[in-house]
Image: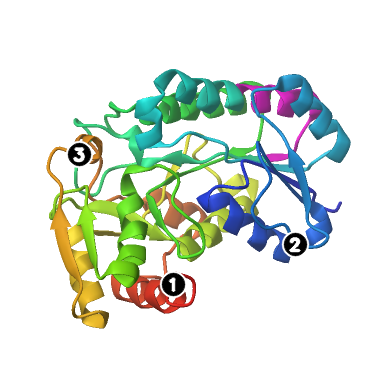
């Protein structure tokens, strides 16, 4: 049976690049992307639909029109934006997920991907090598909604046998798409402003270490998870997904190796710092490595070189 992929929330940082990879894998005609507004670029033969994941009747019509075998739900409001609009963040992140899960049960969709985040951890979670199973007490509405979403995914798997798969993304770094309102966005903005202005003012402190992942690794890891045999998937909440960890001062040092005149400064009392202070500094992804052979390929030096080389022609 030929796979047909439907992605909801395809205009975001991850969705736009994941859609490209899925089209290469399954064919352009078999990947349908959707979001609440048109994408900035839509190539010939690419199929796109306007959809609001909170509009369940319209969502039902979309599912029935395309009859997807796999569904990727990426529509979400991220951490920094969510703190400005907590009620809207909860509504989108949870009720959107519930709409999709209910329709997946009703219409017998074979496989679902839904991303969680390191935001599910909190001030009492282990800071170093944060375990798959540990205390989880998120302080942002984004983290609270993602933790609730993990529990919903596991519940729907056990109750309805839905094949739901998920990873807890760390900060994602990409030169192709703009960041979308997250606490880890500095790790993309810093490259853009380094090339534009030769300096960057960071909203996180110099020694704030956070887990990060290059987009190529994130996309590859997501597809590898979805391709893994069902009997190998032991976690139905969300897998820890590790890449590398670094601080703003460390990434600034790498940039200066290529752009020696680059200058870094820091802002005091940015609200995003309080969120970052509750997140892990590094992630233990033993289960992902064991169950579906996850292994990241990019380190900080190779990320920095690739970002600057590509952004030089795009900034």
Q: Is residue 143 magenta?
A: no
Label 1: few (<14), some (14–19) or many (≥20) C-alpha neighbours in 10 Å: some
Tell whether label 3 touches label 2 (CB within 8 Å): no
- Work out which residue is located at the far front of the displayed protein and give it: 197
Q: Which residue is mark 1?
A: 311
Question: Element at badge 3?
Answer: loop
Against 70, is 104 above or below?
above
| Residue at 76% across, 41% down | 49
Label 2: few (<14), some (14–19) or many (≥20) C-alpha neighbours in 10 Å: few
| Residue at 72% across, 21% down | 56
| Residue at 32% across, 28% down | 140
Label 3: few (<14), some (14–19) or many (≥20) C-alpha neighbours in 10 Å: few
Could you tell me residue 190's position as x and y percent? 30, 61
**Gap between marks 2 and 3 measured at Cα:** 39 Å
First along the sequence among labels 2 and 1: 2
**Residue segment shown in magenta:** 98-111
Location of residue 194 (image quadrant): bottom left
Q: Which residue is mark 2?
A: 43
Is residue 245 visible in the rendered image? The answer is yes
Quarter occupied by the C terminus = bottom left
Question: Element at badge 2?
Answer: loop
Which residue is more in the foreground, 225 or 18? 18
Q: Which residue is mark 3?
A: 270
Against 106, is 122 above or below?
below
């Amino acid at each position: 049976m030929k796979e047909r992929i439907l992605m909801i929330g395809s205009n975001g940082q991850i969705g736009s690049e994941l859609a490209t990879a899925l089209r290469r894998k399954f064919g352009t005609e078999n990947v349908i992307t959707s979001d609440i507004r048109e994408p900035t670029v839509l190539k010939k033969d690419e199929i796109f639909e306007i959809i609001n994941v909170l509009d369940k009747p319209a969502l039902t019509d979309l599912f029935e029109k395309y009859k997807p075998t796999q569904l990727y739900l990426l529509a979400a409001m991220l951490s920094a934006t969510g703190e400005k609009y907590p009620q809207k963040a909860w509504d989108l992140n949870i009720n959107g997920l519930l709409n999709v899960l209910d329709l997946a049960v009703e219409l017998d969709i074979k496989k679902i991907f839904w991303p969680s985040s390191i935001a599910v951890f909190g001030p009492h979670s282990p800071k170093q090598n944060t375990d798959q199973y540990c205390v989880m007490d998120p302080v942002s509405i984004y983290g609270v909604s993602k933790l609730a979403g993990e529990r919903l995914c596991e519940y729907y798997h056990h109750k309805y046998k839905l094949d739901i798969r998920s990873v807890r993304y760390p900060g994602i770094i990409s030169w192709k798409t703009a960041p979308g309102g997250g606490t880890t966005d500095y790790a993309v903005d810093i490259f853009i402003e380094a090339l534009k202005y030769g300096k960057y003012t960071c909203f996180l402190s110099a020694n704030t270490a956070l887990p990060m992942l290059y987009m190529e690794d994130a996309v590859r890891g997501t597809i590898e998870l979805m391709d893994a045999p069902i009997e190998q998937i032991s976690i139905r909440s969300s897998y820890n997904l590790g890449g590398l960890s670094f601080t703003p001062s460390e990434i600034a040092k790498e940039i200066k190796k290529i752009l020696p005149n680059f200058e870094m400064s820091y802002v005091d009392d940015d609200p995003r710092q309080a969120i970052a202070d509750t997140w892990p500094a590094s992630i233990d992804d033993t289960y992902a490595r064991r169950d579906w052979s996850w292994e990241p390929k990019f380190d900080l030096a190779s990320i920095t070189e690739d970002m600057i080389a590509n952004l030089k022609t795009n900034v």
